[in-house]
Amino acid sequence: MKTIIEPFRIKSVEPIRMTSVSEREALLKQANYNLFSLKSDDVLIDLLTDSGTSAMSTKQWAGIQMGDESYAGSPSFYRFEQALKELAPFKHIIPTHQGRAAEKILFSILESAQSTDSSKTQIIPNNTHFDTTRANIEATGSQALDLVTKQGLDPELELPFKGDMDLMRLRDLLETQGDQVPIVMLTITNNSGGGQPVSMENIRQTKALCDEFNKPLFLDACRFAENAYFIKQREAGYQDKTPKEIVQEIFSYADGMTMSAKKDALVNMGGWLALNDDNLAMKARNVLILTEGFPTYGGLSGRDLEAMAVGLEEIVEEDYLNYRISSTAYFGDALDKLGIPIVKPVGGHAVYIDARAMLPHISPNDYPGQALAIEMYRLGGIRGCEIGTVMFGQQVDGSEKLAAMDLVRMAIPRRVYTQSHIDYCIECLAEVNKNKEKLRGVDISWQPPMLRHFTCHFTPK
């Protein structure tokens, strides 16, 4: 059979409040045209993020009842630790309330051991840093450097692994400024670059380069299972491997990881920092106790740890991953047939519209991604997320520069929406595309000093 169906039944439903175009126009004005400021009750189809928006399974809800809330030594922590080490056998597993807390701890304890000049800025290279990762790095005074391959910056290019690290540029960095680089990171999948996967060969070669220069390799691994399934589909030699086996190989090349469990652990809250270095682990636990909690709960309840343990088992099920990747591709392929420019090939967790290409009459300085996202909500009640100059254009020194791409991400929550919901989104975007010449850009009328996309105010032109 060619038809792919959801590998689950719906056991509980949540009503959606239907709104009109005129209502949504008023709501946009009240929210200063920032979709983050909308109340979720006023959103019909919420594709703002796939972070923490998944539907949990019956086994996860059963695990909630088993959660042990002991302050120290909870059996729920050890069940979570065992489930994670089955996939990623790092020596030290440190739970946090979400991924950005793991990032905050990691970047606050890093020191470039080889640098003798304290005036030199630390550099953290990655294929592409996401927003909170970049902000946590820059908050320490370090530089977040993106080294994705050039092909990864071409939305139209159809290549299987556009999230790969540019190994030549990484080598040049390590040869010329290696004393300023405490770790190397890889984001799987590459969220800011269109949800594009990283190949196993690139992970392996990145690790070899790190070993050559004595640098630890850390993974920002919040969509590790989706990345593994793309490897199974697209990389020679992995077709007969299970997703679990591929995940285990991925993590065998890493010295540590940060994780938002709100993605590929299928939970609404949680994360962790995992590493092998004893000294770093000691420092991390000290910060954890100050900011998150004792190391066997790390800011989480026992029931959260139980749900994560089950989610780590369910996320590597092949039927689930086949449904997940195929349903996202269904959405993207439909938009492509409508002539709407998207990042190709379609990523695992989201479809990314190339707003700069779709709205060439709107200058990148007028934020075409935000203009498109506003119209999607106005017309159809669909909330997406600008991934472009609004999110990444604000610089630490107060200046602004254009992002490499201006995208609108439509991130699909796991196990939440049905095909009819996605068909509605396709129908709405067909209407937006038909009248796209009428859209105008926006100005930023107020912004905070960093991470402006969450709270800034817009004014339509």
Image: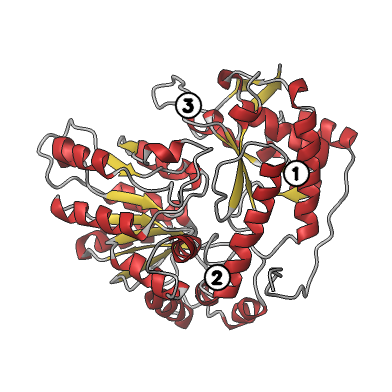
The answer to whether residue 161 is seen in the rendering is yes
Q: Which residue is nearer to you in this view: 393 or 329?
A: 329
Q: Secondary structure at mark 3?
A: loop
- Residue 436: x and y, percent? 75, 27
Q: CA distance from mark 3 to mark 2?
A: 35 Å
Q: Which residue is nearer to you in this view: 256 or 406?
A: 406
- Number of other residues with Cα within 10 Å of mark 3, as a class: few under 14, some 14 to 19, many 20 or more: many
- Residue 319: x and y, percent? 60, 74
Q: Which residue is nearer to you in this view: 389 or 343?
A: 343
Q: Which numbered disc flags the more N-terminal residue, 3 or 2? A: 2
- Residue 383: x and y, percent? 71, 43
Q: Which numbered disc flags the more N-terminal residue, 1 or 3? A: 1
Mark number, residue 394: 3
Q: Which residue is nearer to you in this view: 30 or 162?
A: 162
Q: Quadrant of the N terminus?
A: bottom right
Indicate the amino acid at tag 3: Gln
The colour scheme used to paint the residues is: secondary structure
Quarter of image, res 248: bottom left
Q: Secondary structure at mark 2?
A: helix
- Residue 249: x and y, percent? 34, 69
Q: Which residue is mark 1?
A: 382
The answer to whether residue 30 is seen in the rendering is no
Q: Is residue 442 above or below residue 158?
A: above
Quarter of image, res 381: top right
- Number of other residues with Cα within 10 Å of mark 1, as a class: few under 14, some 14 to 19, many 20 or more: many
Circle 1/circle 3 CB separation < 8 Å: no
Q: Is residue 22 left or right of residue 122?
A: right
Q: Which residue is mark 2?
A: 304
Q: Is residue 302 above or below residue 223?
A: below
Q: How many marks?
A: 3
Q: Secondary structure at mark 1?
A: strand
